[in-house]
Image (cartoon, rainbow, N blue to C red):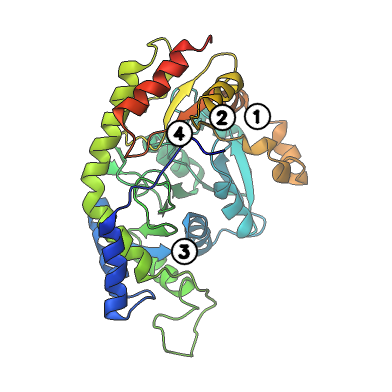
Amino acid sequence: MKYKIPQFQPFLDNREYEAIKSCFDLNWVTEGPKSKEFVDKLCKMMNVKYGVLAPNGTLSLYMALKVLGIGKGDEVIVPNFTFIASANAIDMVGAKPVFCDIQESDLHIDIKKAEKLITCRTKAIMPVHIYGMACNMDEVIEFAKKHKLKVVEDAAQAVGVNWNGKQAGTFGDIGSFSFFADKTLTTGEGGLVVTDNEELYNKLLYIRNQGRLNRGSFIHPEIGYNFRMTDLQTSIGLVQLEKFPYIVEKKAEILARYKKYLNPNLRIIEPNPNSSHIPFRVCILIPGGSQKLMEYMSENEIETRTFFYPLHKQPCYEEKSFWKIFKKKTNFDVSEKMYNEGVCLPSWVGISEEDIKYICDKINEFKL
């Protein structure tokens, strides 16, 4: 159905259109100078040494795992509460995703529960920075050092988000970002892999460019693939970077307006005090279950969205033989509760205060 207030709309205008046109003026539509400029500016903003582009966030995670040597027979601990791409990237390299429940306070991985999942095959942990908030990276790094694990950060929803003043995605061995259409900074499709490790960076250069460093050569020292982006996409990204301070400001205003108009008894998910917050979604909890409220909102032409469906219940993972072993070691009470009670409210940059008030009025008048 067509909604009066959709869940999301990208923040694009004539500036992005003109930026794409400039690629045609230069007659350069594949990965080129604009892509280099985009990566350089992102690395500077994130205070990280090296970065390479990827076609999307899923493949950026795949690249990250691949260059770390994660593969067949290995296990990677990943939150049970995340978009399925996190687990799928682990599966893509031949490893096994091992799901861990989350903390109810901020929806991030519960490190205490991760302790029970360690085996002799555990090679890495993949913390996921959820909904524009940062995971407790102090805990993650300490845990990884204790068990000698690699750290692959899924920061798809966390461009510009910091933990204790340091960009999410830059704590571990390697970090992954997404520029999908609904992300805070978008190129339509696209991803980024970052690291401070020169050896990993060089491996990334080979794997993303058919096993060679330079295009135009037909000698391929290593096995690689085509994981490039285009200047058409990164020209949009450069405009988005110019807009980014405004986007962050507007996102904060949107959250403040929801807090102003919503029933104060409703809980809005907030980050750990050591995390900054650029609300990827405005997330509320409806005690007892969210389904009836979401149906009511749809009747009033407001598009809402559930929280992530727990990975251990996904049909494609539920019957995996290896996973049945881990089901006996942990439970997923928190991620199941969050899915059943969580609602994501429209929070795109262009949403008006009038629309936010209308959304809140409908929620407040609903008999919870």
Q: CA distance from mark 1 to mark 2?
A: 7 Å
- Residue pointed to by mark 2: 113
Mark positioned earlier in the residue sequence (3 or 4): 4
Mark 4 residue type: Lys
Of 298 and 221, the residue lying toward us: 298
Lower position in the chain sequence, tag 4 or tag 1: 4
Circles 1 and 2 in contact, beta carbons < 8 Å: yes
Q: Secondary structure at mark 4?
A: loop
Label 4 sits on residue: 4
Answer with mark 1 or mark 3, whichever residue precedes in sequence. Answer: 3
Rendering quarter of residue 22: bottom left
Name the residue tied to disc 1.
330
Q: Is residue 115 above or below residue 17?
A: above
Alpha carbon separation for disc pair 4 and 2: 42 Å
Judge the density around disc 3: few (<14), some (14-19), many (≥20) Cα neighbours within 10 Å: many
In this picture, residue 112 sits left or right of residue 176: right
Tags 4 and 1 touching, CB below 8 Å: no
Q: Position of residue 253 (x, y in %)?
A: 26, 30
Along the line of sight, which residue is nearer the eye, 169 or 141? 169
Residue type at numbered disc 1: Thr
Question: Residue at image x 56%, y 58%?
Answer: 70
The amino acid marked with disc number 2 is Lys
Q: Who comes first in sequence, dot 3 or dot 2?
A: 3
Residue 247: x %, y % from top left: 27, 42
Which of disc 2 and disc 4 is earlier in sequence?
A: 4
Callout 3: helix, strand or loop?
A: loop
* Front of the two marks 4 and 2: 4
Q: Are marks 4 and 2 in contact (CB under 8 Å)?
A: no
